[in-house]
Amino acid sequence: MALSKAEAEKLHQRLARASEAASPPGIPPLESGDRLTRDEFERRYNAMPNLKKAELIEGVVYMPSPVRHKGHSKPHRRIGAWLTIYCENTPGTDAGDNGTIRLDTDNEPQPDAMLFIEESAGGRTSISEDDYVVGAPELIVEVAASSASRDLHDKFKAYRRNGVQEYVVWRTYDKRIEWFRLRGQEYVSVEPDAKGVIASSAFPGLRLHVNALLNGEMKKVFAELQKGLKSKEHAEFIQRLAKKAGGSKSSSKSK
């Protein structure tokens, strides 16, 4: 049943009071639409420990709505499983789920999933002293409702500008997966091959059977991934990462 104008106003006031109570005196609460620096965003976010997700995208605060199961939670879990299997079989890489990234001074996103090469193995990201990812991961995945989502607009621009090598967007309501690869300073769309598979350029051996994922055929998704993990390209990639990690350790010792 729709709320009356008076009831809606009372509800708004209660929510506002609850939001203010969640942050210490003197620190304003985060609100969607706020335009903040990254430092101020973090100050307010850290003062609200009960808040599970907020993002700063191109200087604007976004606080997502409650998450639906089929539209987000379930696809999110499946993407996480796919990346976890790859990561656990590829020493020198790391993966994250809903982790905050200090991307640049105007952007602190919290993507659904990310995969990156560890700094010690030649990656561009690092982990800060207070345990945040700093810099652009090689691959980011977002689960979005449709093409109208900010994941394909402001986030798209921020990820491209900061050099995220591959950006995957699963548009759940549209039943589409879009895979973008950075070429120069622009993202180009990558189409599946004749077998319906997209192979990552940043992570040799990371293979995705697109239709299988869209249809929830996870055994088929994992079988395709296993082909990649058993490939010559994947073995050579592990060797390159190990060599860089070994060189990094030798360099640290010499200092």
Image (cartoon, rainbow, N blue to C red):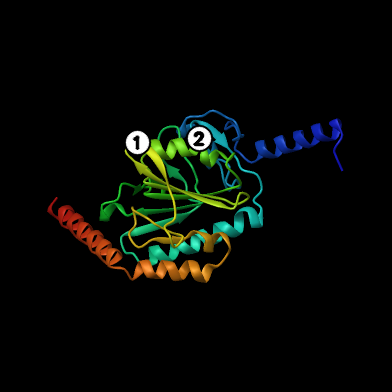
- Which residue appears farthest toward the front when viewing the image? 194
- Determine the residue positioned at 60% across, 40% down: 63
> Dot 1, crowdedness within 10 Å: few (<14), some or many (≥20)?
few
Residue 72 placement (x, y as % from top left): 61, 53
For label 2, the SS is helix
Q: Nearer the viewer, mark 2 or mark 1?
A: 1
Q: Where is residue 234 in the image (x, y as percent from the top left)?
A: 30, 64
Q: Is residue 195 above or below residue 55?
A: below
> As rendered, which of 58 and 253 lies closer to the eye?
58
Regarding mark 1 in the picture, which secondary structure is present there?
loop
The residue at the far left in this view is 254
Instruction: Give the label on residue 185, or none.
Output: 1
Q: Horizontal and vertical percent for residue 81?
A: 49, 64
Residue appearing at x 59%, y 37% in the figure = 24
Q: Where is residue 105 in the image (x, y as percent from the top left)?
A: 41, 32
Q: Which amino acid does label 2 sit on?
A: Asp
Q: Residue at x 23, y 64 (%)?
A: 239
Give the residue pinned by disc 2: 154
* Above or below, 187 relative to 231: above
Vertical comparison of 14 with 74: above or below: above
Check the image and name the residue furthest to the top.
Answer: 35
For label 2, the crowd category at 10 Å Cα-Cα, with few meaning under 14, some 14 to 19 and many 20 or more, is some
Q: Nearer the viewer, residue 20 or 114?
A: 114
